[in-house]
Image (tube, helix red, strand yellow):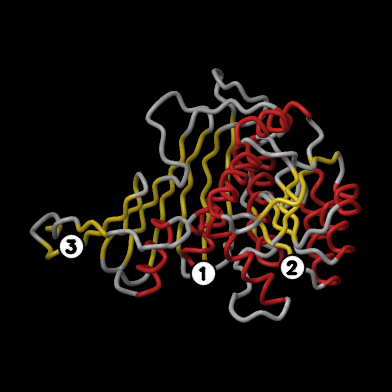
Amino acid sequence: MQVIQMGMGLIGNAWLRVLLKTGIMQHAAFVEVSQGNANILIERYGLKSPKIFKTLSEALDAVSADVVLEAIPPAFRLDTARITAEAGIPLLSEKPMSDTMDNARRIVDIADESGVLHVIAQNYRYKAPVQTVKQILASGEMGAVQHVTVEHYRGLHLPGFHQQMRYPLLQDMSIHHFDLMRFFLGEEYETVYGRAWNPSWSTHAGNASAAVIFTFPGDVMVSYDASWASQGMPTTWTGNWRFECEKGVLNLRDDAVSIQSADNQGDHEYAYRPVKDIPAVDLKYDNQAYLAQEFYEAVNRANGANGGNTPGTTVQDNIYSLQMVFDVIESCEMGQVVTRA
């Protein structure tokens, strides 16, 4: 399968590394406005005579490609969606889907009207520990979930378009965690209250920290504390997740899964069974590689080949994860609870 990759920066590098390692797709061309970015990756991976264009339209006119993969700033994703839909070429886009909800809705309309597959790279769903948690929750062995706590702390300084974001953490990172809330719970949130701020030592121009409380159906509470300006003890990118369940606690910490339940009720406090470590499920591909394989199979299926399901992170689904981001931002700016429309 021949792919045109848009973007050869930080995230473009990650995708190039994955595709070169797995061989799931082969590069027909690249689109990159910075020759400096292009030169770095050409040298790093020893790319032989790569075809590099300044615009997607130029690339599509010059080469034959089956799909487009884009890792460019969110503000340009609406144009990419229009161009690929008009060309009838499936599109795999980095998250977030767009820079505004209005543009995101236009992107969904384009996908609906054209019927062309458009998938968002919510690759965190496809990490082995995350899939392990999902299987445990889906099995019912822990009973109903009542409360979830999520922690994510990193110390980052990202140049470029991230410095123009008013809420870099929420807009660029929290979309992963909010999407995982929907994935784990299988529900859409009902209300949200959030606060965001920027620590005095932060290198970000926008608010790099947030504390958020969601309610989900069944009075399930989800609390989210995160920062991109932490000065120590970073979490994994996935974050730490604790699920308080009817039959015990399910924990995802440092990308390791464990469970524990109460044995009996003593006079003043429960007695607890030993913590049980749960081995991660075995995945042939994980993370971005899983997503690339899923996208590959879906495109082949659309072209008449056997196998391949519709990916779980199409734009038609992912807009609900993006809505969470903008509703949290609205709550932060209003200082009020926001109810999902």
In the figure, residue 333 lies in which quadrant? top right
| Residue 7 position within the rendered picture, expressed as x and y whole percent measured from the top left | 73, 41
Considering the numbered disc 3 on the image, is that residue within a helix, a strand or a loop?
A: strand
Front position among marks 1 and 3 = 1
The answer to whether residue 196 is above or below residue 212 is above
In the figure, residue 40 lies in which quadrant? top right
- How far is the residue under mark 1 from the one under mark 3? 26 Å
* Mark closest to the chain's N terminus, 1 or 3: 1
Q: Nearer the viewer, residue 251 or 121?
A: 121
Residue type pointed to by label 2: Leu
Q: Which residue is identified by label 1?
A: 186
Residue in the image at 71% along x and 29% along y: 39
Residue in the image at 78% along x and 29% along y: 35
- How far is the residue under mark 2 from the one under mark 3? 47 Å
* Mark closest to the chain's N terminus, 1 or 2: 2
Considering the numbered disc 2 on the image, is that residue within a helix, a strand or a loop?
A: loop
The answer to whether residue 238 is above or below residue 139 is above
